Image: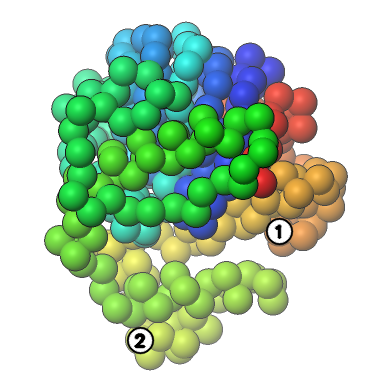
Amino acid sequence: MSHHWRGWCLLRPGVLLYGGTIGTNQLHAHHAVHLIVSAEPFTVADAQGRRLTTRTAVIPPDTGHAILTGARGALLAQLEPGSSPGRSLLAASGAGAGASTWSPPLPRLTHAGTGPGPHQVAAPLTFARPSDGHEHSAEAAAALKIVEDWTGQRRAAEIPIHPAVEMAIAVIPALLAGGPVRLGVLAAAVYLSPSRLAHLFSAHVGIPLRPYVRWQRLQHAIRLVAAGESLTVAAHGAGFTDGSHFTRVFRHNFGTAPSTLAAAIDWLP
């Protein structure tokens, strides 16, 4: 997020949600499934320089992209690639690496902050609602409903994930707290060989284990920043070797430095 970005941000398990004005950023690639819905057209480019001007975009994990022109009234959601919402969104959108496929034929939304469009989902996925009393609580609740509608186009049961991969995803947070996450240790915890787990993880989550773990560390650092910690404390608390390491990973994932978090974002509880 560059200094051109300004708005509110909400963190929930499996989702980072932003609402407000989006600005330009550098070419980057994050390990999440990225949904952008905007009241105004914005222009996004892929790593080959192909451009798309649209009001909606779904960007798959580890896909290089940059926002060339921003927009007001935007909603951005970054979803865990191994989560049911993340897998559902990718399956429903058919989004691919080329910019021409980033604008999917999904439900029409009139505005990112006014609620879902006419398409209704029978059994939407649910996220915890923001606390009442915050200036942007109602807007965030409406934005979460939009994400539920977009990710609920296919039921999670229709997109199965291997039980060992599901178990590994559940185990990783506890391993992160103790230091580096070793493939062998994780494989033993889910009763598979390291090579088998590595293959299954990439196949079912969409990215290899190592970048997934790095994404988990980055999210933890963001949660610490949202809780009021300094960037240095957040970097060490999330297991980065130092502030410079955290900055490099953050810039690779968001296209700008982490120092912009404190300057431009209003964090919701």
Please state which of residues 148 and 105 is positioned toward the viewer in this rendering.
148
Residue 185 falls left or right of residue 99 = right
Mark 1 burial class by Cα count in 10 Å: few <14, some 14-19, many 20+ = many
Residue 27 falls left or right of residue 120 = right
Residue 70 image point, x, y percent: 49, 12
Residues under numbered marks 2 and 1 in contact, where contact means CB atoms less than 8 Å apart: no
> SS class of the residue under badge 2?
loop
Tell me if residue 136 can be seen.
Answer: yes
Please state which of residues 224 and 216 is positioned toward the viewer in this rendering.
224
Residue 16 falls left or right of residue 57 = right
- Quick one: label 2 or label 1, which is nearer the N terminus? 2
Which residue corresponds to mark 2?
A: 192
Q: Amino acid at mark 2?
A: Leu
Residue 174 image point, x, y percent: 60, 76
**Disc 2 versus disc 1: distance between alpha carbons?**
27 Å
Marker disc for residue 238: 1
- Determine which quarter of the picture holds residue 155: bottom left
Which residue sits furthest front? 133
Tell me if residue 251 can be seen.
Answer: no
> SS class of the residue under badge 1?
loop
Q: What residue is shown at x 26% (from left), y 27% (from top)?
A: 117
Mark 2 burial class by Cα count in 10 Å: few <14, some 14-19, many 20+ = some
The correct choice, above or below, for 84 with respect to 246 in the image is below
Q: What residue is shown at x 62% (from left), y 24% (from top)?
A: 7
Rendered-image quadrant of the N terminus:
top right
